Amino acid sequence: MGFSADTFAGKEPIIQAVNVTRTFGKGSAAVHALRGANLSVAPGRLVALKGRSGSGKTTLLNMLGALDQPTEGAVYFAGQDITFIPDKKRNELRRTRLGLIFQSFALVPYMSAFENVEFGLRIAGVPAAHRRDYTEQALDFVGLKPRMKHRPFEMSGGEQQRVAIARAISHRPKLLLADEPTAELDSRMGLQVMKVFKSLVQQEGMTIILTTHDPAIMEIVDQVYALEDGYIVDES
Protein backbone atom coordinates (compact mmCIF):
# COMPACT_ATOMS: atom_id res chain seq x y z
CA MET A 1 0.00 0.00 0.00
CA GLY A 2 3.02 2.22 0.29
CA PHE A 3 2.52 3.89 3.65
CA SER A 4 5.67 5.60 4.91
CA ALA A 5 6.71 5.18 8.53
CA ASP A 6 10.17 6.70 8.00
CA THR A 7 9.38 9.70 10.17
CA PHE A 8 8.92 7.41 13.16
CA ALA A 9 11.66 4.90 12.43
CA GLY A 10 13.66 5.84 15.54
CA LYS A 11 13.25 4.89 19.17
CA GLU A 12 11.04 7.81 20.18
CA PRO A 13 7.56 6.69 21.27
CA ILE A 14 4.82 7.52 18.81
CA ILE A 15 2.29 8.01 21.63
CA GLN A 16 2.67 8.57 25.39
CA ALA A 17 0.31 9.12 28.29
CA VAL A 18 2.00 10.64 31.35
CA ASN A 19 0.17 10.51 34.71
CA VAL A 20 -3.17 10.86 32.93
CA THR A 21 -6.19 11.35 35.17
CA ARG A 22 -9.77 11.77 33.96
CA THR A 23 -12.55 12.66 36.37
CA PHE A 24 -16.18 13.09 35.36
CA GLY A 25 -18.39 15.16 37.67
CA LYS A 26 -17.51 16.81 40.97
CA GLY A 27 -17.65 16.19 44.68
CA SER A 28 -19.41 13.07 45.91
CA ALA A 29 -20.72 12.43 42.37
CA ALA A 30 -17.24 12.38 40.83
CA VAL A 31 -16.28 9.31 38.79
CA HIS A 32 -12.55 8.66 38.41
CA ALA A 33 -12.23 6.93 35.04
CA LEU A 34 -8.41 7.20 35.00
CA ARG A 35 -6.12 7.65 37.99
CA GLY A 36 -2.61 8.54 36.83
CA ALA A 37 -2.20 6.18 33.88
CA ASN A 38 1.21 5.93 32.20
CA LEU A 39 1.74 4.38 28.79
CA SER A 40 4.47 4.56 26.15
CA VAL A 41 4.22 2.86 22.74
CA ALA A 42 7.04 2.62 20.20
CA PRO A 43 6.34 2.89 16.46
CA GLY A 44 5.39 -0.26 14.59
CA ARG A 45 3.79 -2.07 17.53
CA LEU A 46 0.45 -3.84 17.96
CA VAL A 47 -0.73 -3.10 21.49
CA ALA A 48 -3.80 -4.18 23.46
CA LEU A 49 -5.49 -2.48 26.40
CA LYS A 50 -7.35 -5.06 28.46
CA GLY A 51 -9.64 -4.81 31.46
CA ARG A 52 -13.21 -5.25 32.59
CA SER A 53 -15.95 -2.79 31.63
CA GLY A 54 -15.38 0.42 33.56
CA SER A 55 -11.64 -0.17 33.95
CA GLY A 56 -10.75 2.91 31.89
CA LYS A 57 -9.76 1.32 28.55
CA THR A 58 -12.00 3.38 26.30
CA THR A 59 -11.35 6.56 28.28
CA LEU A 60 -7.60 6.10 27.78
CA LEU A 61 -8.08 5.38 24.08
CA ASN A 62 -10.10 8.60 23.76
CA MET A 63 -7.22 10.53 25.35
CA LEU A 64 -4.71 9.01 22.95
CA GLY A 65 -6.96 9.82 20.00
CA ALA A 66 -7.45 13.49 20.97
CA LEU A 67 -11.18 12.83 21.43
CA ASP A 68 -11.05 13.94 25.06
CA GLN A 69 -8.71 15.84 27.37
CA PRO A 70 -7.38 14.65 30.72
CA THR A 71 -8.23 16.31 34.00
CA GLU A 72 -4.54 16.05 34.86
CA GLY A 73 -1.45 14.73 33.11
CA ALA A 74 -0.30 14.96 29.49
CA VAL A 75 -0.51 13.12 26.16
CA TYR A 76 2.28 13.26 23.56
CA PHE A 77 2.04 12.26 19.91
CA ALA A 78 5.39 11.86 18.12
CA GLY A 79 6.99 14.01 20.81
CA GLN A 80 4.41 16.82 20.56
CA ASP A 81 2.26 17.69 23.54
CA ILE A 82 -1.33 17.39 22.26
CA THR A 83 -3.02 17.57 25.66
CA PHE A 84 -4.63 20.97 25.37
CA ILE A 85 -4.11 21.99 21.76
CA PRO A 86 -7.04 23.95 20.25
CA ASP A 87 -10.02 22.03 18.87
CA LYS A 88 -9.13 22.97 15.31
CA LYS A 89 -5.68 21.37 15.65
CA ARG A 90 -7.16 18.32 17.42
CA ASN A 91 -9.57 17.82 14.53
CA GLU A 92 -6.76 18.22 12.01
CA LEU A 93 -4.63 15.68 13.89
CA ARG A 94 -7.43 13.12 13.82
CA ARG A 95 -8.17 13.73 10.15
CA THR A 96 -4.58 13.52 8.92
CA ARG A 97 -2.36 11.48 11.27
CA LEU A 98 -4.68 9.24 13.30
CA GLY A 99 -7.09 6.49 12.30
CA LEU A 100 -10.08 5.62 14.49
CA ILE A 101 -12.15 2.44 14.49
CA PHE A 102 -15.16 1.94 16.74
CA GLN A 103 -17.03 -1.13 17.99
CA SER A 104 -19.98 -0.27 15.74
CA PHE A 105 -18.88 -0.18 12.13
CA ALA A 106 -20.37 3.33 11.62
CA LEU A 107 -20.72 2.90 7.86
CA VAL A 108 -23.21 4.95 5.85
CA PRO A 109 -25.87 2.30 4.98
CA TYR A 110 -26.68 3.32 1.43
CA MET A 111 -23.12 4.08 0.35
CA SER A 112 -21.03 1.35 -1.26
CA ALA A 113 -17.78 0.22 0.34
CA PHE A 114 -15.91 2.45 -2.11
CA GLU A 115 -18.13 5.46 -1.31
CA ASN A 116 -17.76 4.95 2.46
CA VAL A 117 -13.98 4.97 2.22
CA GLU A 118 -13.82 7.80 -0.31
CA PHE A 119 -16.14 9.90 1.87
CA GLY A 120 -13.63 9.60 4.72
CA LEU A 121 -10.91 10.92 2.42
CA ARG A 122 -13.09 13.90 1.49
CA ILE A 123 -13.44 14.74 5.19
CA ALA A 124 -9.67 14.35 5.62
CA GLY A 125 -9.10 16.90 2.87
CA VAL A 126 -7.29 14.54 0.51
CA PRO A 127 -7.17 16.08 -3.00
CA ALA A 128 -9.67 14.65 -5.47
CA ALA A 129 -6.84 13.52 -7.77
CA HIS A 130 -5.67 11.01 -5.12
CA ARG A 131 -8.95 9.83 -3.63
CA ARG A 132 -9.73 6.99 -6.07
CA ASP A 133 -6.25 5.50 -5.83
CA TYR A 134 -6.15 5.81 -2.03
CA THR A 135 -9.61 4.27 -1.73
CA GLU A 136 -8.85 1.31 -3.98
CA GLN A 137 -5.48 0.71 -2.30
CA ALA A 138 -7.08 0.65 1.16
CA LEU A 139 -9.86 -1.72 0.08
CA ASP A 140 -7.34 -3.93 -1.69
CA PHE A 141 -5.22 -4.10 1.46
CA VAL A 142 -8.16 -5.44 3.50
CA GLY A 143 -9.11 -7.86 0.70
CA LEU A 144 -12.31 -6.15 -0.37
CA LYS A 145 -11.49 -4.47 -3.67
CA PRO A 146 -13.64 -7.05 -5.55
CA ARG A 147 -16.62 -6.07 -3.34
CA MET A 148 -16.10 -2.32 -3.36
CA LYS A 149 -19.46 -1.68 -5.07
CA HIS A 150 -21.40 -3.58 -2.39
CA ARG A 151 -23.27 -1.73 0.33
CA PRO A 152 -23.03 -2.64 4.04
CA PHE A 153 -26.27 -4.63 4.14
CA GLU A 154 -24.87 -6.85 1.37
CA MET A 155 -21.80 -7.71 3.46
CA SER A 156 -21.01 -9.89 6.47
CA GLY A 157 -20.06 -8.34 9.80
CA GLY A 158 -16.41 -9.14 9.20
CA GLU A 159 -16.49 -7.50 5.79
CA GLN A 160 -18.16 -4.41 7.21
CA GLN A 161 -15.46 -4.12 9.86
CA ARG A 162 -12.79 -4.45 7.17
CA VAL A 163 -14.45 -1.60 5.25
CA ALA A 164 -14.27 0.43 8.47
CA ILE A 165 -10.57 -0.41 8.71
CA ALA A 166 -10.04 0.59 5.07
CA ARG A 167 -11.71 3.92 5.77
CA ALA A 168 -9.54 4.45 8.86
CA ILE A 169 -6.27 3.72 7.02
CA SER A 170 -7.07 5.27 3.63
CA HIS A 171 -5.54 8.65 4.55
CA ARG A 172 -2.35 6.85 5.64
CA PRO A 173 -2.26 7.58 9.38
CA LYS A 174 0.74 6.88 11.60
CA LEU A 175 -1.36 5.58 14.51
CA LEU A 176 -4.53 3.48 14.40
CA LEU A 177 -6.78 3.29 17.47
CA ALA A 178 -9.52 0.65 17.65
CA ASP A 179 -12.15 0.30 20.40
CA GLU A 180 -13.24 -3.35 20.74
CA PRO A 181 -12.90 -3.92 16.96
CA THR A 182 -13.83 -7.62 17.12
CA ALA A 183 -16.52 -7.50 19.81
CA GLU A 184 -19.42 -7.86 17.36
CA LEU A 185 -17.72 -10.59 15.30
CA ASP A 186 -17.47 -14.35 15.63
CA SER A 187 -14.04 -15.86 16.24
CA ARG A 188 -13.32 -16.57 12.56
CA MET A 189 -14.19 -13.05 11.43
CA GLY A 190 -12.34 -11.60 14.41
CA LEU A 191 -9.23 -13.49 13.34
CA GLN A 192 -9.54 -12.03 9.82
CA VAL A 193 -9.57 -8.53 11.29
CA MET A 194 -6.53 -9.28 13.46
CA LYS A 195 -4.67 -10.59 10.41
CA VAL A 196 -5.29 -7.24 8.73
CA PHE A 197 -3.93 -5.45 11.81
CA LYS A 198 -0.82 -7.64 11.87
CA SER A 199 -0.22 -6.92 8.19
CA LEU A 200 -0.56 -3.18 8.76
CA VAL A 201 2.09 -3.35 11.48
CA GLN A 202 4.48 -5.76 9.74
CA GLN A 203 4.19 -4.51 6.16
CA GLU A 204 3.34 -0.83 6.57
CA GLY A 205 5.04 0.05 9.87
CA MET A 206 1.79 1.35 11.34
CA THR A 207 1.24 1.46 15.11
CA ILE A 208 -2.06 0.04 16.38
CA ILE A 209 -3.59 0.26 19.85
CA LEU A 210 -6.84 -1.60 20.50
CA THR A 211 -9.06 -2.38 23.46
CA THR A 212 -10.29 -5.93 23.97
CA HIS A 213 -11.71 -8.52 26.35
CA ASP A 214 -10.65 -11.42 24.12
CA PRO A 215 -7.82 -13.62 25.50
CA ALA A 216 -7.09 -14.95 21.98
CA ILE A 217 -6.26 -11.45 20.76
CA MET A 218 -3.90 -10.89 23.67
CA GLU A 219 -1.87 -13.87 22.40
CA ILE A 220 -1.44 -12.19 19.00
CA VAL A 221 -0.39 -8.65 19.97
CA ASP A 222 3.13 -7.43 20.76
CA GLN A 223 2.29 -5.84 24.10
CA VAL A 224 -0.60 -5.80 26.60
CA TYR A 225 -1.49 -3.13 29.14
CA ALA A 226 -3.93 -4.23 31.85
CA LEU A 227 -6.24 -1.61 33.39
CA GLU A 228 -8.13 -1.88 36.64
CA ASP A 229 -10.18 0.87 38.29
CA GLY A 230 -8.47 3.59 36.25
CA TYR A 231 -4.91 2.36 36.86
CA ILE A 232 -2.54 0.52 34.55
CA VAL A 233 -1.72 -2.37 36.85
CA ASP A 234 0.31 -4.62 34.55
CA GLU A 235 2.35 -4.46 31.35
CA SER A 236 3.47 -7.54 29.44
Image (tube, rainbow, N blue to C red):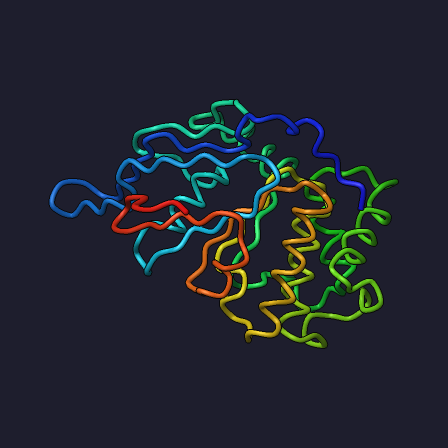
Left or right: residue 193 versus residue 102 is: right
Q: Position of residue 23 (x, y in %)?
A: 26, 40
In the image, taking residue 38 as reference, residue 98 lies left or right, namely: right
Comparing 230 with 202, the one in front is: 202
Residue at 40% over, 47% down: 225
As displayed, is residue 50 above or below residue 26?
below
Left or right side of 16 for 234: left
Q: Nearer the viewer, residue 163 or 220?
A: 220
Displayed quadrant of residue 191: bottom right
| Lateral position of residue 190 relative to residue 72, left or right | right
Place of residue 37 in the rendered image (x, y in percent of width and height, measured from the top left): 33, 38
Check the image and report above or below for 182 versus 24: below
Count the numbered circles shown. 0
- Residue drawn at x 32%, y 60% as measured from the top left: 52
Q: Return the residue found at the far top.
A: 80
Q: Nearer the viewer, residue 217 or 104?
A: 217
x%, y% of residue 169?
A: 68, 48
Residue at 28% over, 46% down: 230
Query: From the viewer's perspective, is residue 118 above or below residue 67?
Result: below
Residue 40 vertical position relative to residue 200 in the rendered view, above or below: above
Q: Position of residue 208 (x, y in %)?
A: 57, 46
